[in-house]
Image (tube, grey):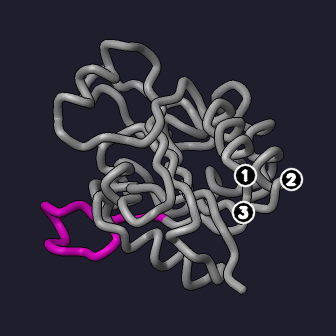
């Protein structure tokens, strides 16, 4: 029997995005910049308690750009895993400008497929939670998708783009509560 999973984007869902005067919002480039968002630890505990595998699936093009060193990404991942129990962490470290047509960069579903294969997961019985339309598109074959959006104007703007999530939530914990209500079966 296959497992069920919750695929979770990292930046903007698990942790705060960093801000740089030149590039604007960006992924943390060192462990000190990696700051958990509120209620993330509780959300992951709830999802694990009700029987889900947890897979972090995240585009990290900063590696390709040289904004983040591979060793720092490893340290950030270690810091994250020290606080939340995840079954796998999957990164796309490519950027289309440098690597052409990789199969893992969201909105493609390569990261989800890799995680599903590694963790023996049925994607059609799993959930995707992200803060970007690329996450929702990557999760198109999941049972349900959740878009973390902090305010109504963001949701309205996102809905106007044509890709729609099944649920719009304030944070990961709100998504976890809905998943629990939907039931594991």
Query: Which numbered tag is attached to residue 49?
Result: 2
In the rendered image, the vertical position of residue 101 relative to residue 184, given as above or below: below
Q: Residues under labels 1 and 2: Cα distance? A: 12 Å
Residue in the image at 30% along x and 50% along y:
134
- In the rendered image, residue 7 lying in the magenta stretch gets the answer no
Q: Nearer the viewer, residue 81 or 8?
A: 8
Residue in the image at 30% along x and 40% along y:
164
Tell which circle, 1 or 2, labels the residue nearer the N-terminal end: 2
Are the residues flagged by discs 1 and 2 in contact, CB closer than 8 Å?
Answer: no
Query: Which numbered tag is attached to residue 18?
Result: none
Residue occupied by mark 3: 185
The local crowd at label 1, few if under 14, some if 14 to 19, many if 20 or more residues have their Cα within 10 Å, is few
The local crowd at label 2, few if under 14, some if 14 to 19, many if 20 or more residues have their Cα within 10 Å, is few
In the rendered image, the vertical position of residue 177 relative to residue 56, given as above or below: above
| The quadrant where residue 122 appears | bottom right
Question: Could you tell me residue 37's position as x and y percent?
Answer: 64, 28
Residue occupied by mark 1: 183
The local crowd at label 3, few if under 14, some if 14 to 19, many if 20 or more residues have their Cα within 10 Å, is few
- In the rendered image, residue 93 lying in the magenta stretch gets the answer yes
Q: Quadrant of the C terminus?
A: bottom right
Residue in the image at 44% along x and 70% along y:
111
Q: Nearer the viewer, residue 61 or 84?
A: 84
Question: Could you tell me residue 30's position as x and y percent?
Answer: 55, 43
Q: Quadrant of the N terminus?
A: bottom right
Are the residues flagged by discs 1 and 3 in contact, CB closer than 8 Å?
Answer: yes
Tell which circle, 3 or 2, labels the residue nearer the N-terminal end: 2
Q: Residues under labels 3 and 2: Cα distance? A: 14 Å
In the rendered image, the vertical position of residue 66 relative to residue 185, given as above or below: above
Judge whether residue 34 can be spotted in this image. Answer: no
Identify the secondary structure beneath mark 2.
helix
């Amino acid at each position: 029997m296959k497992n069920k999973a919750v695929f979770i984007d990292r930046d903007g869902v698990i942790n705060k995005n960093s801000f740089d005067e030149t590039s604007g919002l960006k992924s943390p480039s060192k462990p000190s910049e990696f700051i958990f968002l509120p209620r993330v630890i509780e959300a992951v505990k709830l999802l694990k308690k009700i029987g889900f595998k947890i897979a972090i699936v995240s585009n990290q093009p900063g590696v390709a750009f040289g904004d983040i060193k591979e060793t720092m990404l490893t340290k950030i991942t270690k810091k994250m895993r020290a606080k939340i129990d995840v079954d796998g962490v999957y990164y796309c470290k490519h950027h289309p400008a440098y690597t052409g047509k990789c199969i893992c960069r969201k909105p493609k579903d390569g990261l989800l497929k890799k995680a599903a294969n590694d963790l023996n997961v049925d994607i059609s019985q799993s959930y995707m939670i992200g803060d970007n339309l690329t996450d929702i598109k990557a999760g198109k074959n999941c049972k349900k998708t959740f878009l973390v959006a902090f305010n109504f104007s963001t949701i309205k703007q996102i809905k106007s783009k044509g890709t729609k999530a099944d649920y719009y939530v304030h944070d990961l914990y709100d998504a976890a509560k809905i998943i629990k209500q939907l039931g594991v079966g």
